[in-house]
Amino acid sequence: MTSDLLLAAIVLLGSTVQWVTGMGFALVAVPGLVLLLGAGDGVTLANCSAGAISVVGLAGGWRQVRPRAMVPLCVAAACTVPAGVWLTRQLPEPALLLLMGGLVTCAVLLVMRGARVPMLRGVRGAVAAGAVGGFMNSAAGVGGPPVSLYAVNAGWTIREFVPNAQFYGVLVNAFSVAANGTPRLATAQWVSAVAAMTAGALIGRVLAGRVPEPRARLLVLLLALAGGATTLTKGLWGL
């Protein structure tokens, strides 16, 4: 029962921040899900949940998707998802925790800096961001930060970024679920996760118009940074 409540709390938090800021489910939820369920089921549940949230979010904004940028992003991600799956199946649990914690922490720090990288522009930038994002999504459940960095370097506004990020989230999480499979959860855990996602959507929509976007975004990144550091610590402890 306690583990089901923890699972619901993690998914609720991730879902809420996703609806408030348009991003952040995986960054916030993956470290907690991995620590609670293990690396394999934690990542696959994050893929399923983030994909479902992106599908719902995209329903109202699909007309703003930029195919010219998103096609190379998504094709590149599809090519690197299998590499992420293969790597995670070769590593022991402590090494996986180190990998996931390290990827989350580095991704958050880069996004917080708003890193400007000349190669992350144009078609070449889209391919690079998609390739890294696909690998990170299947290996650690966090494929969004490379796309965020691409958007920063392409000069996209938040309004432009959100629907395109949701489109990318639908496809890259579908690729990852196809490669990784679905999480092995008990019925009660599935019920908890779905209920938490639904509640998070309702709470997030209420808060979206009341929480200043910069403050909400900073909170998401700080939570993700804390989670990444915790996962890193557990991985080091396991070694």
Image (cartoon, helix red, strand yellow):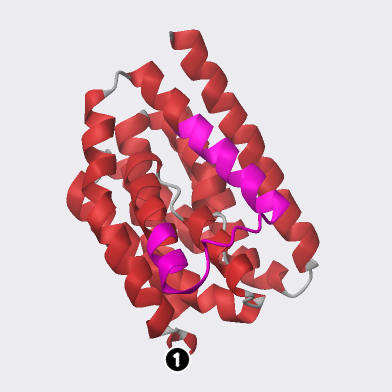
Q: Position of residue 239 (x, y in %)?
A: 43, 8
Residue 114 in the figure: left or right of residue 166: right
Q: 208 and 170: which one is in front?
A: 170
Q: Position of residue 54 (x, y in %)?
A: 43, 68
Q: 49 and 135: which one is in front?
A: 135
Bounds of the magenta span?
100-128
Q: Is residue 60 visible?
A: no
Q: Is residue 237 visible?
A: yes
Residue 168 in the figure: left or right of residue 80: right
Which is the main secondary structure of the residues drawn in magenta?
Answer: helix
Residue at point 41%, 73% (across, down): 123
Residue at point 66%, 42% (across, down): 223
Residue at point 27%, 50% (across, down): 81
Q: 118 and 80: which one is in front?
A: 118
Q: Which residue does the numbered mark 1 point to in the structure image?
A: 63
Q: Is residue 62 above or below residue 234?
A: below
Q: Position of residue 205 (x, y in %)?
A: 63, 72
- Is 115 in the magenta? yes
Q: 129 and 20: which one is in front?
A: 129
- Is 145 in the magenta? no
Mark 1 secondary-structure assignment? helix
Q: Residue furthest front?
A: 118
Circle 1: residue type: Arg
Which quarter of the figure has residue 156?
A: bottom right
